[in-house]
Amino acid sequence: MYLPRLFQEQDPERLLAFMRRHSFATLVTMEDDVPFATHLPFLVEPGAAGPGGRLLAHMARANPQWRAFSQDRDVLVVFQGPHTYVSPSWYVTEPNVPTWNYAVVHAYGRPRVIEEPEECLRILRESVATYESGFEKPWSLEQVGDYAQRLLPGIAAFELRLSRVEGKFKLNQNRAPEDRRAVMSLLERSEEPEQRAVGALMRERDT
């Protein structure tokens, strides 16, 4: 992606935390020179914010995308964070034009389909445990006995060994400090959760 130096995010821990927080991401592949996208929850393993890290996921075997996986070509996973329109009227200095503040991480790597039943089950268990962890009474895969095992033929699990991870946090870094503070303050006080989330990212980036 287009990545001006001012907007680059290179801190591995910050990238890892971002990918985990926004783990419902978009997998993009190419088939016959045509882009194909699937929206999936990903498991983001420790170390996944840099080359050599790993992402894990699964999709319906009826989805043809996994058949296009190749060990000779990277795929792209897009982790989209909060974003918001920024009005010129929010700045202190003049003249100005509108812009958009946002944060996104692009992860590139070679996919491999996982055929081993036990490894597929492990990915399912970890996925459930990850997304149930905040509940008062977390549900577990074991509660359905061998039902999950019977579903395995309809699932294509895969891993993605990462070759490159790019973070772009476009948060008014190209503006004067007083403009950044004005936008950040307004967003932090907003009634819109998405805008408050962008304001929180700006505050984190400025500290």
Image (cartoon, rainbow, N blue to C red):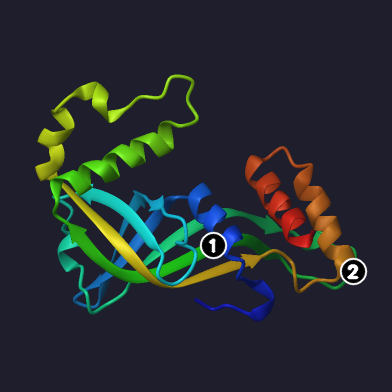
- The amino acid type found where label 1 is placed reads Val
Please give the name of the residue rendered at 35% of the width and 71% of the height, measured from the top-left corner: 109
Q: Quadrant of residue 171?
A: bottom right
- The amino acid type found where label 2 is placed reads Thr
Task: Indicate whether 32 appears above or below 131.
Answer: below
Read off the residue under disc 2: 93
How packed is label 1: few (under 14 Cα within 10 Å), some, or many (20 or more)?
many
Instruction: Say the numbered circle drawn on residue 104.
Output: 1
Q: The C terminus is located in which quarter?
A: bottom right
Is 132 on the left-hand or right-hand side of 73?
Answer: right
Please name which of the two marks, 2 or 1, marks the residue nearer to the observer: 1
Instruction: Say the numbered circle drawn on residue 172.
Output: none
Q: Nearer the viewer, residue 135 or 203?
A: 135
Please give the name of the residue rendered at 54% of the width and 78% of the height, measured from the top-left corner: 2
Instruction: Identify the element where label 1 is drawn.
Output: strand
Please give the name of the residue rendered at 34% of the width and 60% of the height, measured from the top-left corner: 27
Instruction: Identify the element where label 2 is drawn.
Output: loop
Q: Where does residue 19 sit, x and y in percent of width and height?
A: 50, 55
Looking at the image, is mark 2 or mark 1 earlier in the sequence?
A: 2
Is 177 on the left-hand or right-hand side of 133?
Answer: right
Q: Where does residue 204 sit, x and y in percent of width and height?
A: 73, 55
Q: Where does residue 170 sit, x and y in percent of width and height?
A: 65, 66
Task: Indicate whether 129 appears above or below 19.
Answer: above
Q: Where does residue 23 sit, x and y in percent of width and height?
A: 45, 50
